[in-house]
Image: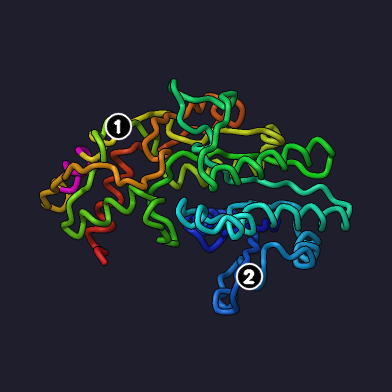
Amino acid sequence: MKIAITGGFGYIGSAIASALINLGYEVIRFSPSKVGAEKRINGMTDFCGSISDEEMWCEILQFTDKVIHLASITSLVKARDNPQKSLEFSIKPLNAIEKASKRLDICPQIVFASTATVYGMVESLPVNEKAKTAPITIYDKHKIIVENRLIALSEQGRISYTTLRLSNVYGLSNSDVFTSDRGVLNHVIRNVARKKPIIMYGNGLYTRDYVHISDVVSAFTLALNNRLANNKIYNVGSGKGICLIDLFGLIKKIVYDELNIKVEILGDKWPENEFEINKRNFTADISKIKNELSWTPKIQINQGIKELVNYYGKHSF
C-alpha cells in the first residue's frame, strides 16, 4: 500500500515516513527541488514539484487514496510575516487534492496534522476536543481554516479525514529540523549539552503538555488504519501537564546525572514582541483517542529527556 505525505522531509514527517516503510508501506514524498528528490531511499518515491500542483496530485492519487498532510510554515514568526506563503503550504495543497480527486472520482482519506494551540488561551485544564477553538496567531488560524475545510468536504462526501491536534512534540527524528520558536524542548536540551544556560522567561509556572515523537507517529499510523477515526478530531498529547520551572529542573538533574554537566537556569523577562500564545497553559485531555483508537502514549517525559540528553551529549554540534 502507498501513502502520500506532504512535509515528509520535516521533523515529524520524516519520522512517520520511516515508520511506515518499516511497517511495509510505500511512501510518496514531495520535494520542492531536484536535490531532495534525488536522495533515493528504499520504499520511498519522491516527487519533485509543488504540493499545490493539481496535475501532480492527479498522478499521485492514481496510486494511493491515503494522504498525510503535514506541510506548513511551522514558525509563528514566518507565518505572521508571510501569511501568503503559509497559505500556500497548508491550504492550497488541500484545494489541489480536492480538485484532483473530483477529476478522478475518488474519495481520498486525509490525516491532517493540526495543533493544540488552536484552542488559544484556555482557562481550564485539561482541554478536550469539544472546547471552543480560539486561534490567535496566523499559524493557528490557518490550521483552523484547513480543519473546517476538511469537515465541509467530508460532509459533501468528497473526502474522509482525521485531524490530530498535536501538543508540544519532542524527541529524536530522522530530520533534526527546528525553528527558534518550535521544537523548544529539543532546542533547550541541545543547548545545555553545549554547556549553555537555560533561559526561562516569566515565572516558569505556565503548564505545557509534551508528547514524544514516537507516540505521535503511532497516532498517525492508527488514524490511517482505523475506520473509527474517520471524520474525527483528536487531541494527541501526554495527557499530563508540567510547568516549565519543574521541566527545566528535571532537565538540569538528568543532564548532571548523565553528562556530569551543571546547568544554570537564568530567569528573564518575556521579550516585548513575544507571541501571547507562548504564555499559555495547556494540558490535553486524551480520553477520546484512548477510548476510540486504543492509543496511549508510551514514552514518559523523564525517559524522553534522558534519550535527548544522551544523544546531544554525543552529538553536541
Q: Residue at x 34, y 31 (%)?
A: 207
Q: Nearer the viewer, residue 64 or 176?
A: 176
Q: Are marks 1 and 2 in contact (CB under 8 Å)?
A: no
The quarter of the rendered structure image containing the N terminus is bottom right
The alpha-carbon separation of the residues under discs 1 and 2 comes to 41 Å
Dominant SS of magenta comes to helix
Q: Can the viewer see residue 38 in this picture?
A: yes
Quadrant hosting residue 304: top left
**Between 220 and 26, which is closer to the camera in this rendering?**
220
Magenta-colored span:
249-255
Query: Residue 267: x percent and y percent?
Result: 18, 42
- Please name the residue shown 55% across and 79% down the image: 35
Amino acid type for the residue under numbered disc 1: Cys
Pointer 1 local density, CA inside 10 Å: few below 14, some 14–19, many at least 20:
some
Residue 243: give its label.
1
Q: Residue at x 39, y 38 (%)?
A: 210
Does residue 224 lie above or below 206 as drawn? below
